[in-house]
Amino acid sequence: MPRISEIGERALIEDFMTFIRPEGLIGPGDDAAVLGKDTVVTTDIVTFDRHFPAGMSYEQFGWYAAAVNFSDLAAMGARPTGFLAALALPPDLEAQAAYDIMSGIDQCCEFCGTGIAGGDTKFGSGIVAGTAIGSMDGRKPMTRSGANPGDIVAVTGPIGGPAAGFLSLELGVEMEDARQSLYVPVPRVAEGMALASSGVVTSCMDLSDGLGTALNGICSHSHVGIDVEFDFIPRGEGVEEMAQASGRDVQDLLLYWGGEYELLFTADKDRFRKLYEMEVEFSIIGMVHDGDHPDLIREGSRSRIGHGSY
């Protein structure tokens, strides 16, 4: 029997889906679950060993632990209504560090218009498991399925900042804004609610695992393909500079790095201008097509992404 490190996280989840009994109107496979009429719930784990880059404070780590969960609510278009925080911290950790983590969580909750509803503490290796609760308030949840050929493809903000921030740490280059995007990601809760309210968005997903993963996720769930113009992808601070300094391809930083908490969405090509009226900031980066391309194909500055490659 293989070890889970050999299977991989995504394949393991797919295996789970073969025998678990899904619950809810929208269950496993989207950014969050929808239970009952309007209740939205999601959970995510962050750890000291994987999510605590050099220079991050404990307070920022707490913010990050909450933000990754609120970003999933944002992708559904939900309004946050509460947060549960379960902490498993090393027994020799200074108490002030624990207070700082909870302060960071509380600050992110306040930013998102809600508060901490409860949680748990145990001794452990340095883990925060967060659960965010939200409400659709009558809005229709956005999901990863629903994209149609001809839809525009857009993102709510710049891409690649966290990658540039991480590489700046690795290479010892001062780049404060990029590092800030790595340490303190901003969940696009207000944007998510506006997108869901617009009635023109056909699918949505957050970019925590990278733009390439999100594009392929929407393709896979919607059974469509997507053409992306790389020149149209908005870049975070220092992306080109850090790509050159590290010897990496700019496209790799934009597509495959992750750590963004922007939203990727598709919208009806004839009605998407309504989003401008709602003052939602976004950049169009491509278009949905009806092809079926199992691989990522680069053609100059264009990438064609299709379902089957997720």
Image (spheres, grey):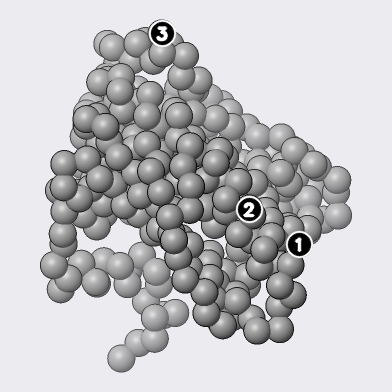
Which of discs 1 and 2 lies nearer the camera? The answer is 2
- Tag 3: residue type? Glu
Most foreground residue, 29 or 62 = 62
Most foreground residue, 106 or 231 = 106
Residue 13 visible at all: yes
**Whole-number angstrom distance, CA of label 3 to CA of label 1:** 41 Å
Would you identify the image quadrant in which residue 42 lies? bottom left
**Whole-number angstrom distance, CA of label 3 to CA of label 2:** 34 Å
Would you identify the image quadrant in which residue 154 lies? top left
Would you identify the image quadrant in which residue 10 lies? bottom left
**Whole-number angstrom distance, CA of label 1 to CA of label 2:** 17 Å
Q: Residues within 10 Å of mark 1 (few under 14, many from 20)?
A: few
Disc with the residue nearer the chain's start (3 vs 1): 1
Residue 213 visible at all: no
Q: Residues within 10 Å of mark 2 (few under 14, many from 20)?
A: many
Q: Which residue is mark 2?
A: 104
- Seen at 64% across and 54% down, the residue is 103
Residue 277: image tag: 3
Q: Is residue 33 above or below residue 37?
A: below
Query: In the image, is 195 to the left or to the right of 17?
Result: right
Residue 36: image tag: none
Which of discs 3 and 2 lies nearer the camera? The answer is 2
Disc with the residue nearer the chain's start (1 vs 2): 1
Percent position of residue 137, x then y: 26, 32
Q: Is residue 56 above or below residue 185?
A: below
Query: In the image, is 123 to the left or to the right of 23?
Result: right
- Asked whether the residues under the numbered discs 3 and 2 touch, taking CB atoms below 8 Å apart as contact, a structural biologist would say no
Q: Residues within 10 Å of mark 3 (few under 14, many from 20)?
A: few
- Tag 1: residue type? Ala
Disc with the residue nearer the chain's start (3 vs 2): 2
